[in-house]
């Protein structure tokens, strides 16, 4: 059973059509303890270029994380290195909950990125440029 | 491409930059904004929308390469 997610349009003055397409879904996060309160849903980009999931630090604080007490590390983006702090969280996505170690940063220019560890490793994903959508099929590992 | 996608796009295009934007549950309209995630959530709840979808708008819209 796969979930078909239409690409979404985002504005840009740098394209003649005035927009670009991106694959994103609403997700929420919580502390990993059972029944922890969840964040509100937020827009997260499906990004195979991200080695793990990264979220804006303010969302982490809202669910109770002390961001700077996480494991500090750096991640390399196209604009250069960025300081992030790693925390264990529950990621609420279509198909259920994924417990993963995700990065948090105040410098992230968007709400969230869904990367290889924590997201892609749990889905079979097809990007379909003809239908302008991606298809997500959850993989449940033994 | 669905009309819903176009409606969402128009809502985002009109939203303030460098802000947190709370979209309605169906992502068709902006129901609240804030300078932080928590402010946008609070304003959304004050507007009667308890299950918004939050989007962080950039300082300027451009294709993303993080």
Image: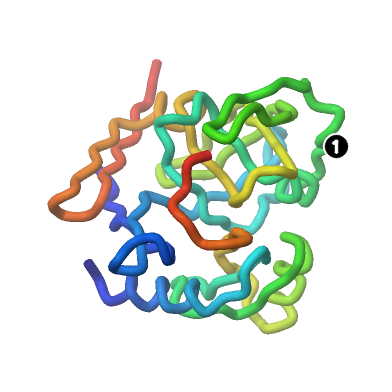
Residue B7: image location, x then y, percent: 37, 78
Q: Is residue A78 left or right of residue A123?
A: right
Q: Is residue B48 visible?
A: yes
Under circle 1, the secondary element is: loop
Residue positioned 43% across, 30% down in the render: A49
Q: Quadrant of residue A116?
A: top left
Please give left or right for residue A44 compared with residue A139 in the image: right
Image coordinates of residue A64 in percent, x first then y, are 81, 44
Relative vertical location of residue A26 with respect to residue B51 in this rendering, above or below: above
Looking at the picture, the colour scheme in use is rainbow
Above or below, A70 against A58 in this view is: above
Q: Residues within 10 Å of mark 1 (few under 14, many from 20)?
A: few
Kindly identify the residue that appears in the image at 35 percent across and 32 percent down: A123
Above or below residue A126? Residue A59 is below
Instruction: Name the residue at the bottom extreme.
Output: B47
- At horizontal 68% and vertical 27% (from top left) the residue drawn is A88
Looking at the image, which is closer to me, B38 or A31?
B38
Among all residues in the image, which is located at the extreme left? Answer: A130
User: In this orientation, does residue A1 appear?
Assistant: no
Quadrant holding the N terminus of chain B: bottom left
Q: Chain of mark 1?
A: A
* Badge count: 1
What residue do we see at 29% from left, 48% from top?
A3
Residue where numbered disc 1 is placed: A66
The quadrant where residue A84 appears: top right
Residue A34, image x, y percentages? 68, 37
């Amino acid at each position: 059973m796969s979930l078909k997610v239409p690409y979404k349009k985002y504005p840009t003055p740098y394209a003649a059509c005035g927009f670009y397409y991106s694959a994103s879904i609403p997700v929420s996060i919580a502390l990993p303890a059972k029944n922890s309160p969840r964040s509100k849903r937020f827009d997260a980009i499906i990004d195979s270029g991200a080695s793990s999931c990264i979220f804006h630090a303010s969302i982490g604080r809202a669910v109770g994380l002390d961001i700077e007490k996480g494991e500090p590390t750096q991640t390399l983006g196209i604009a250069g290195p960025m300081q992030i702090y790693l925390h264990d969280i529950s990621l609420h996505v279509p198909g259920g909950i994924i417990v993963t170690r995700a990065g948090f940063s105040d410098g992230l220019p968007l709400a969230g990125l869904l990367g290889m560890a924590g997201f892609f490793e749990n889905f079979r994903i097809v990007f379909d440029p003809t239908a302008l959508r991606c298809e997500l099929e959850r993989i449940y590992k033994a | 491409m669905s009309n819903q996608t176009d409606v969402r796009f128009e809502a985002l295009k009109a939203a303030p930059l460098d802000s947190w934007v709370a979209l309605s549950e169906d992502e068709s309209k902006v129901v609240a904004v804030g300078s932080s995630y928590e402010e946008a959530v609070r304003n959304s709840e004050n507007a009667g929308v308890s299950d918004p979808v939050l989007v962080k708008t950039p300082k300027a819209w451009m294709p993303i390469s993080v």
